[in-house]
Image: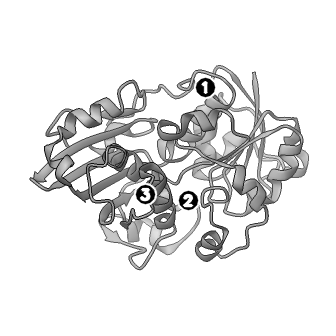
Amino acid sequence: MIKVGIVGGTGYTGVELLRLLSQHPEVRIHAITSRKEAGMPVSDMYPSLRGHVDLAFVTPDDAGLTECDVVFFATPHGVAMAQARELLAAGVKVIDLAADFRLKDTAVFEQWYGMAHTCPDLLEEAVYGLPELNRDAIRGARVIGNPGCYPTSVQLGFAPLLRHKLIDPTHLIANCASGVSGAGRKAEVHTLMAEASDNFKAYGVKGHRHGPEINQQLRAIAGDDSVNCLFVPHLLPLIRGIHSTLYARLNDAGQAADLQATFEAFYQGERFVDVLPAGSAPETRSVRASNTVRIAVHRPQPDTVMVLVVEDNLTKGASGQAVQCMNLMCGLDEHLGLTGVPVLP
């Protein structure tokens, strides 16, 4: 059994980790930390876990995290890098769901997250945790930077086109929308029901911290530093889900290609990426509470490709992907604990 610790178990990605790991056949949850809620039974905060998680929250000092095999950080940015060195020295694998180990350029990290990076040596060895595109490196990793929710959808949507060099990489557009849970479990005016419900709006229009992550990874996928993606996020009046609409200009090879066949071949055998039949339009409700991404590819004009991608921002966009990485790092079947059917209605 894999002994797992969760740092920061009170937020939405934390409870999603608990939901998934409590049903994982090879995992024993050792500790869940929260300084503020120490002593409170987890099921008091999240009644959905009653009968599934019998632990109480503990402080990080009392959690015995160095006794774990894997520790997940479902915490604000900056927490994982402050604790990772001690855990790695004890032989513990680290999976960070925040941004501490995503961006390879510390100056870019500091620009967008407003803090100094305290362990650039660990950042250098950290592996970006998108299994469909980085599986072999994840298997041998000690530190995982779990991808952002928006970047997951954008990368999986553009990857077949970039790898096969079918599009102009210098002018990509990602028009993406997320449910309110993507903002986290904190009290802010813009996420109040009276503000977010019955409304739809763009935000981060002048620049969003997921933009540098998206461009870094798309350049790695393409092997081309000229890749440039314009990313604009939007807030949807729903709790869970991401819908990304991606646009690119097809080059001569792309205009001659069978795009549907290209996507189907690229993701053949991928349990968690579903390429829909030609002409489809995926819906966020079709992936709710699952680790599945659904993709549809369209050619609205002879020289233009449009890719529609949906995912659950808390599962494949965060905690489910982290569990997928854990499975790979620990030599398990990648799909363990993640095969639940999406919830509908």
User: Mark 1 or mark 2, which has the lower sequence index?
Assistant: 1
| Camera sees residue 143 | yes
Side of 292 relative to 261 (left or right): right
Identify the residue position indicated by label 1 in the image: 23
Q: Residues within 10 Å of mark 2 (few under 14, many from 20)?
A: some
The residue under the point 82% across, 35% down is 68
The residue under the point 24% across, 42% down is 296
Q: CA distance from mark 3 to mark 2?
A: 34 Å
Identify the residue position indicated by label 2 in the image: 184
Identify the residue position indicated by label 3 in the image: 224
The residue under the point 64% across, 32% down is 139
Circles 1 and 3: CB distance less than 8 Å? no
Q: CA distance from mark 1 to mark 3?
A: 41 Å
In the displayed structure, 298 sits above or below 136; it is below
- Disc 2 residue type? Gly
Side of 137 relative to 270 (left or right): right
Question: Residue 245's quadrant in the figure?
Answer: bottom left
User: Mark 3 or mark 2, which has the lower sequence index?
Assistant: 2
User: Mark 1 or mark 3, which has the lower sequence index?
Assistant: 1
User: x, y (%) of residue 173?
Assistant: 30, 63
Side of 277 relative to 327 (left or right): left
User: x, y (%) of residue 83?
Assistant: 82, 54
- Disc 1 residue type? Gln
User: x, y (%) of residue 198?
Assistant: 29, 65
Q: Residues within 10 Å of mark 1 (few under 14, many from 20)?
A: some
Q: CA distance from mark 1 to mark 2?
A: 23 Å
Image quadrant in which the N terminus is located: top right
